[in-house]
Structures are given as structure tokens and as C-alpha cells.
Amino acid sequence: MIKCIRCKKVNSISKAGKVRNLQRYYCRHCNLHFTKGPALDKEPARKAMVTLQDIAFKLGLSATTVSKALLNKPDISEATRKKVQELAGQLDYRPNILAQGLRKSKTNVIGIIVPELNNNFFSSIIMGAQEIVSVKGFNVLIAQSAESYDTEVANVKQLIANRVDGVLISVTSETKNFEHFTTFGKYGIPIVFFNRICESIDTPKVVVNDYDGAFRAVEQLIGQGCTRIAHIAGPNNLLLSKKRLEGYRDALKKHQLPAKEEWLVYCDLSQENAKACARQLLSLRRKPDAIFAVNDPVGIQVILTGKENGIRIPEELCVIGFSNDPVSGIIEPGLSTMAQPTKEIGRAAAGILLDMIENKPGAAGLSVLKIIDAELIVRKSSDKNYRDPINAVRS
Amino acid sequence: MIKCIRCKKVNSISKAGKVRNLQRYYCRHCNLHFTKGPALDKEPARKAMVTLQDIAFKLGLSATTVSKALLNKPDISEATRKKVQELAGQLDYRPNILAQGLRKSKTNVIGIIVPELNNNFFSSIIMGAQEIVSVKGFNVLIAQSAESYDTEVANVKQLIANRVDGVLISVTSETKNFEHFTTFGKYGIPIVFFNRICESIDTPKVVVNDYDGAFRAVEQLIGQGCTRIAHIAGPNNLLLSKKRLEGYRDALKKHQLPAKEEWLVYCDLSQENAKACARQLLSLRRKPDAIFAVNDPVGIQVILTGKENGIRIPEELCVIGFSNDPVSGIIEPGLSTMAQPTKEIGRAAAGILLDMIENKPGAAGLSVLKIIDAELIVRKSSDKNYRDPINAVRS
DNA sequence: ATGAAAGCGCTAACAT
DNA sequence: ATGTTAGCGCTTTCAT
């Protein structure tokens, strides 16, 4: 009797043709096709991994000698070293990382905690970090907090259980208590914060110059003649929100522009809430003529909402964001923004973390703050003189 | 003398204020701020991880008994079990995953090989997979092939060296030889292909119905009255490219529309090449009145290129893509597409992989093909009757 | 119901 | 220059 390999049911199975000479079946319960193979030779030829012992045995040496030879220790004869390395190559020997880790209390794995993997900003940073650590033989374990404090606490436990050698962290938008991160410290696991950092923990941090970036963004709007400039800020517990808000306020102050209470709204960074914030600002009696959004996804919602309400951008409303999401270059009008060099942030954070992992002793008791400049990118959304490309005029 | 903790230089250091009562320094060479802490109590209070031994000792038991109690083995008295579990909870005991793995030859880690992390389609699939495997206590190791065959081969080695228990794979657009994947089989590591699958390896696969999706996409264009329908296909070694091409051809055939040679171009899926393909099609003397793009990123380049050339979409040119990238709903005009349920793909592939990992014996010698339907989403790019939202008319 | 012993694969300390 | 011993933390026989 043929059973579904998923649900084990028998009566939902029907034959479904043949594939490469094997009878194919279909389980309508699971919506699953599967093939019953020729039992694959019973003993599945499952090659065991090659170990030091294997090599030692074949060469009539001890495992120790082989280990030393492979690690290029000085007290091994050239001849032996060569023999060993050659055979290891032939057999495609890979040291068992678990055994190594167990022995050395070092896993060669770093963890990364990000709010959301599914987000260009964070995935790019991860790529940058991976680039750096992989050349040193480190693997990356990614943990997603999904912007949830509870999940973030669980992430910490997960990474500790995995005995990671170090962790890169960008905190949740709802994290106000940072107690859980100190657990890493207790176990001597170094951590580096990036982007969304925790001020109160004395450990290295990598950020862009949020204050300066915001300041310049707002000055760009001012340069367009905007005088009623609103700001959709991020959650107040995020330092970057505070810094960008500060930059916004100081830019207005410098140019003696009003900073009306009603022109400042806080957003939890969710798409829905961003839209709500945009609606709120755009339905004001004393409507702003420009909006500085705490980040691009929010800025994009502003543009979308503006368009839905028939507001002409940039003529009636200038918009600028922060981060330079790829969508910003595609949406129409293009969203001006302060670009963050994501790969570089990832690389910098990873570099510092590796330093800490490698110079354990020296690294204790010092804290680094690496500040990377953001770059202004002006697109149509905040450029009243913007001319559409010539060849598009025809349309 | 204060040295930079990065470059170790002494003469590029200047004082830079105080932070939380600590002297802050700045290295102009590295553009780095750092603080010299109070040496953090010399012995950094670095708590060692709690082990079975620790618990056993405190309770006057053997490690064996503690292990059994924690694993809920039947031959332990209720009283002991309770005592042990309580203390373990108090001490926040976490079994050492490496030791467990070494002992059981099982790491509880699955690998995922994707072309690019920085891509909504793949990152969403990873999220779906992670969701499923994490509840069973598995971790995910992500390897990026960067669309490079050589990197993919390296990824395989990396994952094997990490002794992963199973692997989810979506192959590179340039992978023609699948030899390297058989290495997993040799070591008894189960693999599941998704999306970009390898036909020739007898192992489970999860895909959307590419043929049917393409067929319906093209029929949608035909329903708009388009008769000169072009296709930007994917690399020919990808099965999904072939299937979508087939669906395209059959839809044309069914409706007795011409399938001109010059209306079919192949794209390597890079943004630059996509743009080039779009240009090529749009500069034809006998210009197509519709383009079916193998995926959304390519479709987006078609729209962008069309707009650059003053071609009105959808009036002069209809466009449809595949996958439903978030950008497709934002670009103007909105890009019609066949949506792929990414999370579901990830979940399905992960579920099958876990089955294989858990029923090692039963799983050998059978192969599953799970086909998920794509869903047609019509947006303005292929809807000649599209009406802009009423409240936008004002603009 | 409990524990002693062995061993997963590796490496560092200590002989020889 | 090579090998012996021991142990990282855990689980699995196999006693008791």
C-alpha cells in the first residue's frame, strides 16, 4: 500500500505518471507529488566524514601529528607536513567544526540580530558584515526580532545557546529595556551595536551621523523655499529618532523657521502607521509645504498618500527621507534622501567585532563610536526645478 | 600613552570630551571615537556557562542522571527530575550545542543557499523557512552564491564543513553543472530545491507553477487586445525560464498569435542586462505591443525603459512580470504580475526538509515535487481600462 | 532509579 | 620530530 510521505494517508493517493522510470504518486490531501525510488541500494553509500584519525591511520602517524601538520605548527618535519596536507587534500578533509569549537570554546560563528531580514537596509548590512567575517572563516547566524521586544529577548538566548563568538545588534523599535543584552557581557561575548544602538551599554557602536544628516536634509528643503516643514519622527526610544529630530529642530532654528507642535508626529515605522501619519499631516488646516520623514519607507508612504490626495509633489509638497532605499529611485516622483552606506556600516561593525573577538584582553573596557556620514541625494520629491529627462517629453 | 585601538597609532589621537565619566579619544587616522574604560574589574566577571556537571555537583548526582532528567528519559524518579529541572531553570542552563552535536552527529542547523540575500523574493522565503524550522529548534545558516557558480561550489563546502543537517537550495543563474550538490548526498545530507531547481537530482523540490503562471500572464495580455507579445526570458539553464517560456509560447499558440523570433530575448537577470533587453525590444522596427518579463525586477526595468523612451504604458505597451515584488505596487504604472507566495514556498520547502531529516530511513529513495499556484495580480501596466483613483484626478 | 565508562573529533600540555 | 594523555560537554550503553 502506498502511503503519503507527508500525512501518511493511504486513500488520498493516486498514480500520476512516471518520472525517470519511477512511478509517481499524488496525494490530494497534501497537494503533493512524490516518487517512490528503488530503495537506493539499502545502505545509502553514506560516506562518513574524513577525520584526523583516518588520515593518521593511512599514514601510520598519530592524530596529534596530523593535527599539527595541518595547523602548520613549527615542530613538524617538512616531509610529514607535506604528506599529510596532500592526503588531506585528496580526501577532501574538513575539520569537524563542532569538535574544534568544543575543544577551543570558540564556534567561529557570529550572530546578528536585526528587526527584519526582509528589508533592504538590514539585508545589505548583513551582506557587508558577511563579506568581512567570511574571509576570516566565520559564519553568520541571523536572528530576527520582528520589531518585537519579546522576540529580541528570545534571540539573545538563542545566540547564547549557540555559543556565538560575538554579536551585531540593531535593536527593536519597541526596546526600552536593555537588560537582556548585558547577558552577552556576562559570558564574555562581545557585541557591537549598529544603526539602532543602545546608549547605556558600554560597547562599540556604528551609526551614521543622524543629527547632521537630518540637519542637511531639512536645509535642502529650506533651500527650496519651504517654510512650513513637518517631520514624521521615529519611535522616541530609538536614539536615531531623537538625533534626527534634533537635527530637524536645529535646522529650523538656524533659519528661524517655525516648528509648530502639530507638524511633528511620531511613527512606529510600520507601513500602516506611516500612512496614518502622512494623512494626519496632510489634513491639517495649516498644511505643511514639506515633510522630512525619518526614513525612506515612511517617506514613500508620504508620497503615495500625497498622490492619493492629489497633492502635487514637489510643487505643493516637498518630501525627503533617510537611507536611500532602492524603491526611492523608482517611485515617482523620486524620493530625495540621505543615503546610508549600508555595506560599509556592515563592514565596519563586523571589523570592530572581529577585533574584539581576536584581541579579547585588549578589547575589554573600551568603547568605540564610529560615525559614518550620510550623503544627500536630491531627487524630484524635493527639487522644484526638476526637469524630466528630455526624451520623456514626448509622452 | 594612548594608542588607537584600531591602528595602534599614538600620534593621531586627540581627546574628545567625556562620556559617562570616561575620557573619550578620537583617532583622526581611523575616524574613530573610543573610550578608555575603568579596566572593567580586571577579571571581567566572565561567567562560565553552566554545564551538566555543575548541576550534578550541586545536587550530588551524576552528570548522566542530570542529562536523563533533562531529556525526560523514563528511568528517572519524579522527584529527581523535578529537582534537576528546577535548578537548571534557576541557573539558566543551556545545553552546549556543540557537545550535543558532536555526540549525536547532528547540529540542528540547516543551510540555505540563495543567489542574493538582498532580494525580497529570497529573503521572504528564508523568513518562511526560518519560521518553520525554529519551532523545532533548528538554526539557519545562510550562504549567498551571488549568482556565481564558483561561489556556489564554495557554499556547498562551507555548509558541509559546518555539518548542517539539511540544505535548502535555489541555484545560481549560471549553474549548469550540478555535480557539487551530489556531495551532500554522499554524506547523507538531505537537500530540497526551491524555485530555481535542479531537475537531474532526485530530491524534493518546491516550485510555483511556472508554466501555468506564464500561460495565464500572457493570456491576460491577450485579453487586452495585444497581438505582438514579446518575452524577456531568463537564462536557459534555469528550469523556470524554460517553463515560463513554454507557457508563453503555448498561450500564443492557443490564440494563434505570432511568436516572432525577434520578440524573444534572454536576460541574465542582472539589472543592466534587463535594461539592455528592454531597449532591444523597444527599438525593433516591428515593435511589440506587450512584454512578458520573466520576473518583476526585469519587468520594472521594462517600465523604466519604456518611460524613458516616452512610450505610454499600458496604451502603447502592456507589461507583466512574475513574483510580485513590493516595488511592483509602487512603481508607476503599477506592474501586473503573477504573485508567488514566498513565505509559503519557504515553509513548504522547510517542512519537507525537516521530514527528511527526522525520518532519515523513510525519506531515502523518494522524491517530492510540490507545485504551488501563482496568483494573477492585474495592475495598470497591463490594464487598458485602468482608472486612476478618483481623488487623484485633481492633480 | 542511578551511575561508571566510553567516545564523538579535536587540540594543547607534556613526555619521549 | 613525533606520540601519549587528557579533556572540551554531552549522551548512550551497560552495569549496579
Image (cartoon, coloured by chain):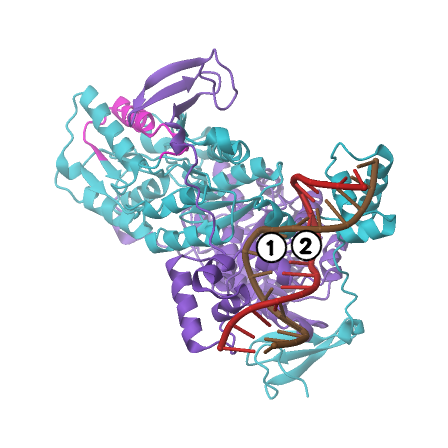
Chain colours: A purple, B cyan, C brown, D red
For image coordinates 54% across by 52% down, the residue present is A122
Question: Can you give x and y, in whole percent of width and height, for residue A143 in the image?
Answer: 60, 48
Mark 1 or 2, closer to the camera: 1
Residue A74 visible somewhere in the drawing = yes
Question: Can you give x and y, in whole percent of width and height, for residue A119 in the image?
Answer: 52, 47
* A248 and B220: which is toward the camera: B220
User: Which amino acid type is marked by label 2?
Assistant: Leu
For image coordinates 59% across by 53% down, the residue present is A294
Q: Which mark is residue A238?
A: 2
* B64 and A103: which is toward the camera: B64
Is residue B382 rendered magenta in the image? no
Question: Can you give x and y, in whole percent of width and height, for residue A249 in the image?
Answer: 65, 60
For image coordinates 32% across by 50% down, the residue present is B270
> Picture quarter containing residue B297?
top left
> Picture quarter containing residue B221?
top left
Horizontal arrangement in the rendering, residue B93 relative to residue B349 (left or right)? right
Chain under disc 1? A
Looking at the rendered image, the quarter that the N terminus of chain A falls into is: top left
**Looking at this rendering, what residue extends furthest in the top direction?**
A11
Horizontal arrangement in the rendering, residue A193 relative to residue B317 (left or right)? right
* B59 and B195: which is toward the camera: B59
Residue A314 visible somewhere in the drawing = no
* Badge 1 density bin: few <14, some 14–19, many ≥20, Cα 10 Å: many
Q: Is residue A368 above or below residue A287?
A: below
Is residue B222 rendered magenta in the image? yes
Question: Can you give x and y, in whole percent of width and height, for residue A288 in the image?
Answer: 58, 49
Q: Which residues are magenta?
A: B202-230
Among numbered discs 1 and 2, the one appearing first in the sequence = 1
- Disc 1 marks which residue? A111
Chain under disc 2? A
